[in-house]
Amino acid sequence: MVNETQHTCSASSSSKSDGGSSSGSESSKDSSRCSTPVLDADRHERLREKMRRRQDSGDRWFSLEFFPPRTANAAVNLISRFDRMGAGGPLFIDVTWHPAGDPGSDKETSSMIIANTAVNYCGLETILHMTCCNQTKDDITGHLQKAKRLGLKNIMALRGDPVGEEWEEEVDGFNYAVDLVKHIRNEFDDYFDICVAGYPKGHPEAESYEADLRHLKEKVFAGADFIITQLFFRSETFLKFMKDCQAIGITCPVIPGIFPIQGYHSLRQLVKLSKLEVPQEIKDVIEPIKDNDAAIRNYGVELAVSMCRELLDSGVVHGLHFYTLNREVATTEVLKRLGMWKEDPRRPLPWAVSAHPKRRVEDVRPIFWASRPKSYIYRTQEWDDFPNGRWGNSSSPAFGELKDYYLFYLKSKSPREELLKMWGEELTGEESVFEVFTCYITGEPNKNGHKVTCMPWNDDPLATETNLLKEQLEKVNRRGILTINSQPNINGKPSTDPIVGWGPSGGYVFQKAYLEFFTSSEIVTALLKVLKKYELRVNYHIVNVKGQNITNAPDLQPNAVTWGIFPGREIIQPTVVDPVSFLSWKDEAFALWIEQWAKLYEEESPSRMIIQYIHDNYYLVNLVDNDFPLENCLWQVVDDTFELLNSPTQQ
Amino acid sequence: MVNETQHTCSASSSSKSDGGSSSGSESSKDSSRCSTPVLDADRHERLREKMRRRQDSGDRWFSLEFFPPRTANAAVNLISRFDRMGAGGPLFIDVTWHPAGDPGSDKETSSMIIANTAVNYCGLETILHMTCCNQTKDDITGHLQKAKRLGLKNIMALRGDPVGEEWEEEVDGFNYAVDLVKHIRNEFDDYFDICVAGYPKGHPEAESYEADLRHLKEKVFAGADFIITQLFFRSETFLKFMKDCQAIGITCPVIPGIFPIQGYHSLRQLVKLSKLEVPQEIKDVIEPIKDNDAAIRNYGVELAVSMCRELLDSGVVHGLHFYTLNREVATTEVLKRLGMWKEDPRRPLPWAVSAHPKRRVEDVRPIFWASRPKSYIYRTQEWDDFPNGRWGNSSSPAFGELKDYYLFYLKSKSPREELLKMWGEELTGEESVFEVFTCYITGEPNKNGHKVTCMPWNDDPLATETNLLKEQLEKVNRRGILTINSQPNINGKPSTDPIVGWGPSGGYVFQKAYLEFFTSSEIVTALLKVLKKYELRVNYHIVNVKGQNITNAPDLQPNAVTWGIFPGREIIQPTVVDPVSFLSWKDEAFALWIEQWAKLYEEESPSRMIIQYIHDNYYLVNLVDNDFPLENCLWQVVDDTFELLNSPTQQ
């Protein structure tokens, strides 16, 4: 979910009372209209423009620095952290570059891939660090090309630490960050926004503080757009530095790097690396409590909050950059105490928007991946353009195949033992599966006392919206209608509704009721008889793992099931039930039975065979009630189906 | 308005219960989805397919033949006739080719341009006749290329009458219709549907009836898709002919040409031209009443109805082709009595759809041209593609300039004297103009006793929908809010609603309230103060003839003001208020004051100067109330404006 600190829809709707600049029919020729209704102007701006706009408006912002994880499991956790910390509304995050960790590779843990995930899957504006020392021009160009290809738009240009003690300048080589800045501008023109590092105390290797300031000026004049500083311990340090920057003609934004002290050891290590000195007054507090992590963190938060307040109160600081060390608590706490952590429940669209520039216009998706947006993004990453306005306009309808690689993004956050506790150490029949689904819906513990907080099709607990349907869902899951996706009908609720609202304020949102479930062929047979009665009202798609497909969708056309009407804009229809992509989703939905559930059990074990049986024999069904102004009839459809099944004459 | 005899939306929504033909993920790769929700499948079919589908379903249809008019005035009348007769639901119309009348030229009266108008401006499936005798290959290819460029898709391939008495075959020339059929297929492959003529009595110049049948077979085997016959007077003549066709292997549709006798002289002339003989029993009836036009026409209608009934009852005839002689009454009467005239009030979209193949996907237009659709089509004819799904997607936003040529399509059907009676022989001030607008709204006669049935911005009486707003409109026009376009808000009425409904049944249609008017700068000043109170609710655009433009539209984005939600389909938003095209419309709307109204009066006359003053000084205003579920606030906005104007403190 993209939650910038300030939504700009209202800001940009100011009157254009130019009194004469539009000179008649001329203006229709070079129209400035854009190809999509722009629910969030931020999505279309460069980072440096976002920064400038906030500076102009006086809105405060923050950003978060992370380093790449060491293991694939740690990567899964970091991505969850991106989602959680992204909710607070950072202007951007940045990912550091670890030359020793193969940072430009395709490994799940590389700087490049982590930044890619942040942009594309988590929808975060992202800066990728890049160092140039001891690297060839070709290597660097290759990294930059790859970053561009992945949709990264911002580079933090650094020298990096030289390898070996006796470092010497290479002639025509990349010796300083300024060489990298120049290279980026030469080879990629204005494509990237470039950030460089500033040293409030001077770079430890610089001849002098003044000489270092001159180097910084060179970097800016070579094309850097803004500066993030090394950490410091006193606000005066930064404020003096900023004054000195301005004095020698550096006019771009200078963003203070904030390091909330989170523990004794991490502080020592960082100080060693950065060759900074910790002020005596801080040492005096920390040394006595060095074994009490909580106490140090509390002190660190206090210290950071008061320093940040001084910076913000100075009037010259608009944004704060946090060195998170990949941890959540301290930074979040500082931001909350500063009133800068803004969990904005408003959503530009009902689903999380990707920050990839190619996907900027995207505003329609099939409903099927509602609980698996990262999988959807992965499977459509090769598309040349993305549907906007209408799903049918997509010119690249082919979905990427189910491949091992993307199962990385499918991985559950929970380990196998935990999944077994939730989904059953041993299944005794299809009914034990029904029970798992039912417990997931109700939130009640299963018979072994464990709550079911995730399912193969949904890594998170039930959405608030689904809660609206809880009672009905419980009833049908108990009887073998194994629901994996649903939404209630909505007939014009305000776009600001805390549960179902999305988009700019002043609008109205609508939904058609939707229900998607696995169920047995016996139930499907009865369901099809019942659906005849609802032919004009309910659209259905029923498919099994082999692709046998029954539908009443006219001409394979998509059915819009979520849409919004907003002041002064075209209509947005962000989710559709698309008959064609349903068959791609079907492959994934059935595969999850095996990949995530059956494989928890031994081969040939009864539990595994039960899941395999369901996989082989059940149908995946989706139902849409087109009459959104009336009471949802889908529950009646299900009731009628069971009534038919239970009526003795029909059996 | 496109009103085919059968709407196919429901027909095409049959279940696809194939139980296995969609084999999983394969089907997502070569998707058969189309790029638009296809409200009317007919729009996407070739004529021969439409014919075949009706034959399969047993639905009866009719078609209408017209000849090109001699004068520009007659052309205006013929186009009105196309609109009126198009409402009865012909499967197609055809336009004959008059070699002597420069049929392929750009003249308003040429066969080519009349057929172009029928397709593009009236939305009628159209066949253009073309003769080949005495023409060069290059000429013919040129005509065909032009027809294709204009969006014509069907050709009636004819030999035409040779010039001079002693006609001789040219070697390698176009001697027979079959040569033209072959040429079309050679040069244009399968692009055109080709129709050829059949002679139930044999072609007068053929060696024999049998020889003529063989020629017909040659034409069909050369690539003709169907046959329309010469007129005949007895159903047996046709039924025998059809049997004979089948006997020698002609399997394509054979459509009987019906000639309702409309008068003594036209019958004699036609008989002479076609070298047919009128049966004695018809002569016996007609001769005694030859000076009584009404009696002959009544007899002609009777005769045609009974012959058509016999043809239809035979079971082998599904469609009837009428030689209208450009007259309406007799053919319409025959069709009504046969129950084949189907004025279907259902509209696929709220505006008349063009039948040009390039415009097939078009389903969004700016609301401004609502009363001037032909002008809109003309001014956008150079576009390469047309907005669908979203207005913002239009890649060719430039509107054609106001040129003399298209004023042809703007011409009023009423002559100058009639317009002067309606709009005032002599204007005494702005108030006399207010009165004209008011009388147009109320339908009451003006002070000279004449009803105002059209206005420069609207060639037809008030739309039924506008009637919903009549009382309010009257009130504001009296006070100088000179309305030219408006619609009420609608919050989910059934798509089958007789007044505001459109699109397939089972859907819901919505509108935002819209009001567009000219008014004085004094009123605009007050209005702008009032609009501040409605800033979040009402979007406005206010512009004068010089292009001074005041708006609160966010980022020049279009505002959807009409949309529909349908079962199993994406959302359709057929009208938008687009800030950019408003400035093109503005030029036209202001020009109409001068071109259509001021120029009725002498130069320098007071009446002309009053209109000129309004043209030079008034503003064109449009208002949208975004809160469509609430009561329309635009009347309140106008009331507040007058209250402000009348309050002594504000004056």
Image (spheres, coloured by chain):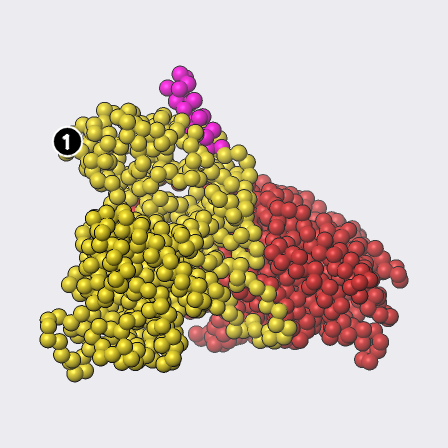
Chain colours: A red, B yellow
What kind of secondary structure does the magenta stretch mostly adopt?
A: helix
Judge left or right: residue A633 versus residue B533. Answer: right
Residue range corresponding to the magenta coloring:
B633-651
Q: Amino acid at mark 1?
A: Glu
Q: Position of residue A517 (x, y in %)?
A: 71, 62
Q: How many marks?
A: 1
* Mark 1 residue crowding within 10 angstroms, few (<14) / some (14–19) / many (20+): few
The residue that disc 1 covers is B604
Q: Is residue A81 visible?
A: no
Q: Label 1, secondary structure: give it.
A: loop
B242 or A282, which is in the foreground?
A: B242
A315 or B311, which is in the foreground?
A: B311
B451 or A250, which is in the foreground?
A: B451
Q: Position of residue B596 (x, y in %)?
A: 24, 39
**On the image, which quarter does residue A264 sit in?**
bottom right
Residue under the image location 57 percent in, 64 percent down: B14
**On the image, which quarter does residue B493 sit in?**
top right
Q: Chain of mark 1?
A: B
Indicate the quadrant containing the C terminus of chain B: top left, top right, bottom left or bottom right: top left
Q: Considering only vertical position in the picture, is A310 above or below A542?
A: above
